Amino acid sequence: MLIGFGLCLLGLGFASLFVDRRAAHFFYDHIREPLFVFMDRTTHWAKGGYWLAAAVVGYVGSQVAMHFMGSRAWLHSVAKDSLSFLACLAAASLVLHIVKRVFARRRPRDEMEMGLYEFRVFDFDAIFSLDQPLNSFPSGHAMTIMCAAIVASCLWPALSAVWFVIALWLGLTRALLTAHFLSDVFIGAGIAMLSSREVILGFFPGFAPAWF
Protein backbone atom coordinates (compact mmCIF):
# COMPACT_ATOMS: atom_id res chain seq x y z
CA MET A 1 0.00 0.00 0.00
CA LEU A 2 2.78 2.43 0.86
CA ILE A 3 4.29 1.94 -2.58
CA GLY A 4 1.06 3.25 -4.11
CA PHE A 5 0.87 6.19 -1.73
CA GLY A 6 4.53 7.02 -2.25
CA LEU A 7 4.18 6.94 -6.03
CA CYS A 8 1.08 9.14 -5.77
CA LEU A 9 3.06 11.69 -3.79
CA LEU A 10 5.83 11.64 -6.38
CA GLY A 11 3.23 12.02 -9.11
CA LEU A 12 1.67 14.99 -7.32
CA GLY A 13 5.14 16.46 -7.00
CA PHE A 14 5.91 16.21 -10.69
CA ALA A 15 2.44 17.55 -11.59
CA SER A 16 2.99 20.47 -9.20
CA LEU A 17 6.02 21.58 -11.18
CA PHE A 18 3.57 23.07 -13.69
CA VAL A 19 1.80 25.21 -11.08
CA ASP A 20 4.56 25.79 -8.52
CA ARG A 21 5.22 29.42 -9.29
CA ARG A 22 1.57 30.44 -9.51
CA ALA A 23 0.78 28.58 -6.28
CA ALA A 24 3.71 30.21 -4.49
CA HIS A 25 2.55 33.68 -5.55
CA PHE A 26 -0.99 32.85 -4.46
CA PHE A 27 0.16 31.70 -1.02
CA TYR A 28 2.47 34.71 -0.68
CA ASP A 29 -0.33 37.15 -1.51
CA HIS A 30 -3.26 35.54 0.30
CA ILE A 31 -2.04 33.90 3.53
CA ARG A 32 -3.18 36.26 6.30
CA GLU A 33 -1.16 37.03 9.42
CA PRO A 34 -3.01 34.87 12.01
CA LEU A 35 -2.66 31.73 9.87
CA PHE A 36 0.88 32.67 8.91
CA VAL A 37 1.87 33.05 12.57
CA PHE A 38 0.26 29.72 13.49
CA MET A 39 2.03 27.89 10.68
CA ASP A 40 5.33 29.60 11.42
CA ARG A 41 5.13 28.37 15.01
CA THR A 42 4.33 24.78 14.05
CA THR A 43 6.26 24.20 10.82
CA HIS A 44 9.52 23.55 12.67
CA TRP A 45 7.98 20.54 14.38
CA ALA A 46 9.11 18.83 11.17
CA LYS A 47 12.71 20.00 11.52
CA GLY A 48 15.16 17.15 11.09
CA GLY A 49 17.50 18.15 13.89
CA TYR A 50 14.84 17.78 16.57
CA TRP A 51 13.76 14.31 15.45
CA LEU A 52 17.33 13.18 14.94
CA ALA A 53 18.30 14.32 18.44
CA ALA A 54 15.26 12.61 19.98
CA ALA A 55 16.05 9.32 18.21
CA VAL A 56 19.72 9.42 19.21
CA VAL A 57 18.81 10.16 22.82
CA GLY A 58 16.24 7.34 22.75
CA TYR A 59 18.71 4.82 21.38
CA VAL A 60 21.72 5.80 23.50
CA GLY A 61 19.59 6.25 26.60
CA SER A 62 18.05 2.80 26.23
CA GLN A 63 21.46 1.20 25.78
CA VAL A 64 22.82 2.94 28.88
CA ALA A 65 19.71 1.99 30.86
CA MET A 66 20.05 -1.66 29.84
CA HIS A 67 23.69 -1.60 30.93
CA PHE A 68 22.71 -0.56 34.46
CA MET A 69 19.19 -2.02 34.76
CA GLY A 70 19.55 -5.19 32.74
CA SER A 71 17.59 -6.29 29.72
CA ARG A 72 14.02 -5.04 29.80
CA ALA A 73 11.46 -5.53 27.05
CA TRP A 74 10.43 -1.87 26.99
CA LEU A 75 14.04 -0.73 26.74
CA HIS A 76 14.60 -3.06 23.79
CA SER A 77 11.47 -1.59 22.21
CA VAL A 78 12.73 1.99 22.66
CA ALA A 79 16.08 1.02 21.16
CA LYS A 80 14.46 -0.70 18.16
CA ASP A 81 12.01 2.14 17.56
CA SER A 82 14.77 4.76 17.71
CA LEU A 83 17.08 2.74 15.49
CA SER A 84 14.36 2.16 12.90
CA PHE A 85 13.69 5.89 12.67
CA LEU A 86 17.40 6.65 12.35
CA ALA A 87 17.71 4.07 9.56
CA CYS A 88 14.66 5.45 7.72
CA LEU A 89 15.94 9.01 8.06
CA ALA A 90 19.42 8.04 6.86
CA ALA A 91 18.13 6.22 3.76
CA ALA A 92 15.66 8.94 2.82
CA SER A 93 18.24 11.68 3.47
CA LEU A 94 20.74 9.99 1.18
CA VAL A 95 18.25 9.94 -1.69
CA LEU A 96 16.95 13.43 -0.97
CA HIS A 97 20.37 15.07 -0.83
CA ILE A 98 21.45 13.43 -4.07
CA VAL A 99 18.33 14.82 -5.75
CA LYS A 100 18.81 18.18 -4.01
CA ARG A 101 22.36 18.50 -5.30
CA VAL A 102 21.63 17.32 -8.85
CA PHE A 103 18.47 19.43 -9.31
CA ALA A 104 19.72 22.60 -7.62
CA ARG A 105 16.72 24.90 -7.24
CA ARG A 106 16.09 28.31 -5.75
CA ARG A 107 13.52 28.74 -3.01
CA PRO A 108 10.26 30.57 -3.76
CA ARG A 109 11.23 33.54 -1.60
CA ASP A 110 14.03 34.27 -4.04
CA GLU A 111 11.40 34.82 -6.71
CA MET A 112 9.14 36.83 -4.43
CA GLU A 113 11.88 39.12 -3.16
CA MET A 114 14.41 39.21 -6.02
CA GLY A 115 12.59 37.88 -9.08
CA LEU A 116 14.89 34.83 -9.28
CA TYR A 117 13.65 31.37 -10.25
CA GLU A 118 15.75 28.53 -11.57
CA PHE A 119 16.85 24.92 -11.54
CA ARG A 120 20.52 24.22 -12.25
CA VAL A 121 20.52 20.58 -13.29
CA PHE A 122 23.99 19.01 -13.08
CA ASP A 123 25.56 22.43 -12.49
CA PHE A 124 28.67 21.32 -10.61
CA ASP A 125 29.44 24.84 -9.38
CA ALA A 126 26.04 24.85 -7.69
CA ILE A 127 26.33 21.23 -6.56
CA PHE A 128 29.64 21.65 -4.74
CA SER A 129 29.33 25.25 -3.62
CA LEU A 130 29.71 25.75 0.12
CA ASP A 131 27.27 28.65 -0.11
CA GLN A 132 24.21 26.71 -1.21
CA PRO A 133 21.16 28.91 -1.93
CA LEU A 134 19.84 26.38 -4.46
CA ASN A 135 18.53 23.83 -1.97
CA SER A 136 14.76 24.02 -2.24
CA PHE A 137 14.07 20.76 -4.08
CA PRO A 138 12.98 18.48 -2.37
CA SER A 139 11.91 19.50 1.15
CA GLY A 140 13.90 18.05 4.04
CA HIS A 141 11.16 18.99 6.52
CA ALA A 142 8.55 17.05 4.54
CA MET A 143 10.91 14.09 4.30
CA THR A 144 11.67 14.07 8.03
CA ILE A 145 8.10 14.29 9.27
CA MET A 146 6.97 11.61 6.83
CA CYS A 147 9.69 9.28 8.17
CA ALA A 148 8.36 10.01 11.66
CA ALA A 149 4.80 9.23 10.50
CA ILE A 150 5.92 5.90 9.03
CA VAL A 151 7.57 4.82 12.29
CA ALA A 152 4.59 6.09 14.32
CA SER A 153 2.33 3.98 12.07
CA CYS A 154 4.40 0.93 12.95
CA LEU A 155 4.04 1.68 16.65
CA TRP A 156 0.36 2.69 16.63
CA PRO A 157 -1.09 1.34 13.35
CA ALA A 158 -4.69 2.13 14.33
CA LEU A 159 -3.78 5.83 14.20
CA SER A 160 -1.91 5.66 10.89
CA ALA A 161 -4.31 8.02 9.13
CA VAL A 162 -3.76 10.60 11.87
CA TRP A 163 0.03 10.41 11.59
CA PHE A 164 -0.06 10.79 7.80
CA VAL A 165 -2.48 13.72 7.92
CA ILE A 166 -0.29 15.49 10.48
CA ALA A 167 2.82 14.79 8.40
CA LEU A 168 1.24 16.09 5.20
CA TRP A 169 -0.05 19.20 6.94
CA LEU A 170 3.34 20.02 8.47
CA GLY A 171 4.96 19.39 5.11
CA LEU A 172 2.46 21.64 3.34
CA THR A 173 3.15 24.48 5.78
CA ARG A 174 6.55 24.72 4.07
CA ALA A 175 4.80 25.59 0.80
CA LEU A 176 2.15 27.79 2.41
CA LEU A 177 4.91 29.81 4.09
CA THR A 178 6.77 30.00 0.73
CA ALA A 179 9.80 28.30 2.23
CA HIS A 180 9.36 25.61 -0.46
CA PHE A 181 7.36 24.99 -3.60
CA LEU A 182 4.53 22.45 -3.59
CA SER A 183 6.58 20.01 -5.67
CA ASP A 184 9.39 20.18 -3.09
CA VAL A 185 6.98 19.06 -0.38
CA PHE A 186 5.27 16.22 -2.26
CA ILE A 187 8.50 14.79 -3.64
CA GLY A 188 10.26 15.02 -0.26
CA ALA A 189 7.35 13.18 1.36
CA GLY A 190 7.27 10.58 -1.43
CA ILE A 191 10.99 9.88 -1.09
CA ALA A 192 10.53 9.39 2.66
CA MET A 193 7.57 7.05 2.24
CA LEU A 194 9.21 4.78 -0.33
CA SER A 195 12.64 4.74 1.35
CA SER A 196 11.22 4.12 4.83
CA ARG A 197 9.05 1.27 3.60
CA GLU A 198 12.04 -0.51 2.08
CA VAL A 199 14.19 0.04 5.18
CA ILE A 200 11.55 -1.26 7.57
CA LEU A 201 10.62 -4.30 5.47
CA GLY A 202 14.27 -5.08 4.80
CA PHE A 203 15.79 -4.54 8.25
CA PHE A 204 12.87 -4.46 10.71
CA PRO A 205 10.35 -6.88 9.12
CA GLY A 206 8.50 -7.71 12.33
CA PHE A 207 7.97 -4.00 12.95
CA ALA A 208 5.80 -3.33 9.90
CA PRO A 209 2.01 -3.64 9.89
CA ALA A 210 0.54 -6.11 7.40
CA TRP A 211 -0.70 -3.33 5.08
CA PHE A 212 2.79 -1.94 4.45
Image (tube, rainbow, N blue to C red):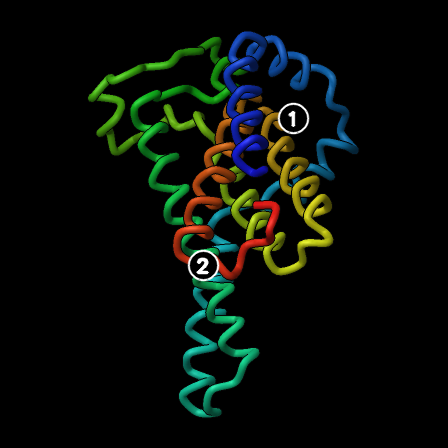
Q: Position of residue 122 (x, y in %)?
A: 25, 18
Residue 86 visible in the snapshot: yes
- Identify the residue at horizontal 56%, vertical 30% (top origin): 4
Q: What's under tag 2, amino acid-wise?
A: Phe
Hey, which residue is sitting farthest bottom in the picture?
A: 69
Q: CA distance from mark 2 to mark 1?
A: 35 Å
Label 1 element class: helix
Q: Are there few (<14), some (14-19), or many (20+) residues within 10 Å of tag 2? A: some
Please identify the quarter of the rendering in which residue 19 is found. Answer: top right
| Image depth: mark 2 or mark 1 in front | 2
Q: Nearer the viewer, residue 90 or 32?
A: 90
Residue 69, given in percent of the width and then of the height, sits at 48, 92
Query: In the picture provided, is 21 more to the left or to the right than 161?
Result: left
Using the image, tell me which numbered label, if any, was put on residue 204. Answer: 2
- In the image, residue 181 lies at what x, y percent? 54, 21
Q: Amino acid at mark 1?
A: Leu
| In the image: residue 131, left or right of residue 112 | left
Write down the quadrant of residue 112 in the picture: top right
